Image: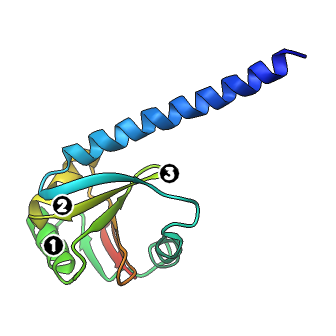
Amino acid sequence: MTKQPTTIMSIMQSELLREKLLERRAIAFAKSILGVKKSSVERIGRDDFIQHRSLLAKHANLDSLPVKKWDLDTYEEHEVANWFASRLAQVIEDAYYVPFEVPFIVRVEVEDALEFINSLWSIHGTHDMTIFIKEPIWVIDLQEREDGIYYFEA
């Protein structure tokens, strides 16, 4: 009978340790992003950014038509980065949110959009990128697929 409380305590400690390690990874990720004047890691709840996640699922899935698409064989990386940066420039909000692993999100104040974009591409090793904007609620998503780079927004 004494094993059950010990097992529950072990599970709780394991979960706390997992979350602490995840938070450290999120902090390291935030610090490695270039082109920002400030970044921070925020803990999010189950219902935080729920509208953003819903928009992402609805408008940036495999069946969705992209706002723009670049063919993988012919695209120029700087063209994609410049176009993406121009979309970010339309945002009045000074902070963007880069989803990390639940329960964390990274808040960034971008100073140089091109450096920011190229930095995320370098960190991820792909052109995939999702950005949430709080006000107005807006989601922008870039996906590198087998046949091209797809840009979605909602």
- Give how far apart the Cα atoms at labels 2 and 3 are: 22 Å
Q: Is residue 21 left or right of residue 93?
A: right
Q: Nearer the viewer, mark 1 or mark 3?
A: 3
Count of labels shown? 3
Q: Nearer the viewer, residue 39 or 124?
A: 39
The N terminus is located in which quarter? top right
Q: Amino acid at mark 2?
A: Ile
- What secondary structure is marked by label 2? helix
x 83%, y 22%: residue: 4
State which tag comes first along the sequence, 1 or 2.
1
Mark positioned earlier in the residue sequence (2 or 3): 3
The residue shown at (70%, 25%) is: 9
Q: Quadrant of the C terminus?
A: bottom left
Query: Which element carries disc 1, helix, strand or loop?
Result: helix
Disc on res. 102? 3
- Image coordinates for residue 12, horizontal then vertical, percent: 65, 31
The spot of residue 37 in percent (x, y) is 13, 58
Going by the numbered disc 3, the residue's amino acid type is Val
Q: Decide which of tag 1 and tag 3 comes sooner along the chain.
A: 1
Are the residues tagged 1 and 2 within 8 Å (C-beta)?
yes
Tag of residue 117:
2
Q: Which residue is mark 1?
A: 85
Q: Residue visible at 57% across and 66% down?
A: 47
